[in-house]
Image (spheres, rainbow, N blue to C red):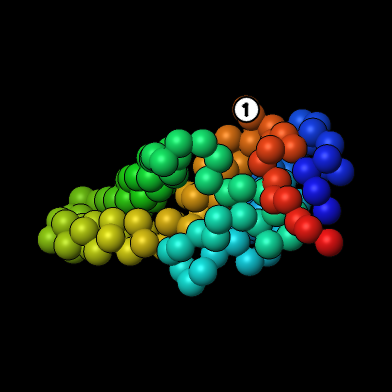
């Protein structure tokens, strides 16, 4: 398949793109296998051939930002629930040390989701074009 046989892709539903991303699938086609291991994203989708790092060398700074926002939201939610449930004597030491542990674990566990979600957000605003797909020789 060559780039000439790939038409420009029309806008897809943002909910579909984000839903696929949250399942760690290619937001464009829904294909699996976007990662080498847990942290390293492949260069292209193994199913549709779309370039996964679309743009500059610092493309995934947005993913890091999403990861930070997700972890901070998780931490604030857990903190609020623990304080409300244990009021008037919240376990401040447990919250302090547990918060550090949750921040580290959350950052690690949310990382692949942040990368695919950032790709979906990018596809919402910049739908893929022929140039984003791999040229395959028959």
Query: Residue 110: image x %, image y %?
Result: 44, 57
In front: 130, or 29? 130
Foreground of the two, 107 or 35:
35
Which residue occupies the extreme front position in the image? 137
Q: Residue at x 48, y 72 (%)?
A: 37
**Residue sitting at x 64%, y 36%:** 123
Q: Position of residue 60 (x, y in %)?
A: 43, 43
Question: Label 1: few (<14), some or many (≥20) within 10 Å?
Answer: few
* SS state under label 1: helix
- Point 78% across, 43% down: residue: 3
Residue 73 left/right relative to 99: right
The one of 98 and 13 positioned closer to us in this rendering: 13
Residue occupying the far right of the picture? 5
Residue 81, image x and y in percent? 36, 51
In the visual, does 5 lie left or right of 125? right
The residue that appears at 25% across and 64% down in the rendered structure is 101
**Residue 57 shows in this picture:** yes
Residue assigned mark 1 = 125
Res. 73 image quadrant: top left
**Where is residue 31, by image quadrant?**
bottom right
């Amino acid at each position: 398949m060559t780039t000439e046989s790939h038409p420009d892709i029309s806008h897809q539903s943002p909910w579909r793109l984000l839903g696929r991303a949250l399942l760690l699938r290619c937001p464009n086609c829904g294909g699996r296998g976007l990662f080498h291991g847990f942290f390293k994203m492949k260069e292209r989708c193994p199913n549709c051939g779309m370039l996964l790092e679309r743009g500059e060398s610092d493309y995934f700074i947005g993913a890091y930002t999403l990861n930070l926002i997700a972890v901070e939201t998780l931490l604030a939610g857990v903190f609020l629930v623990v304080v409300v449930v244990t009021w008037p004597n919240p376990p401040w030491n447990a919250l302090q040390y547990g918060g550090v542990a949750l921040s580290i674990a959350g950052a690690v566990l949310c990382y692949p989701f942040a990368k695919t979600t950032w790709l979906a957000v990018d596809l919402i605003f910049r739908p893929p074009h022929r140039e984003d797909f791999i040229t395959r020789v028959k």
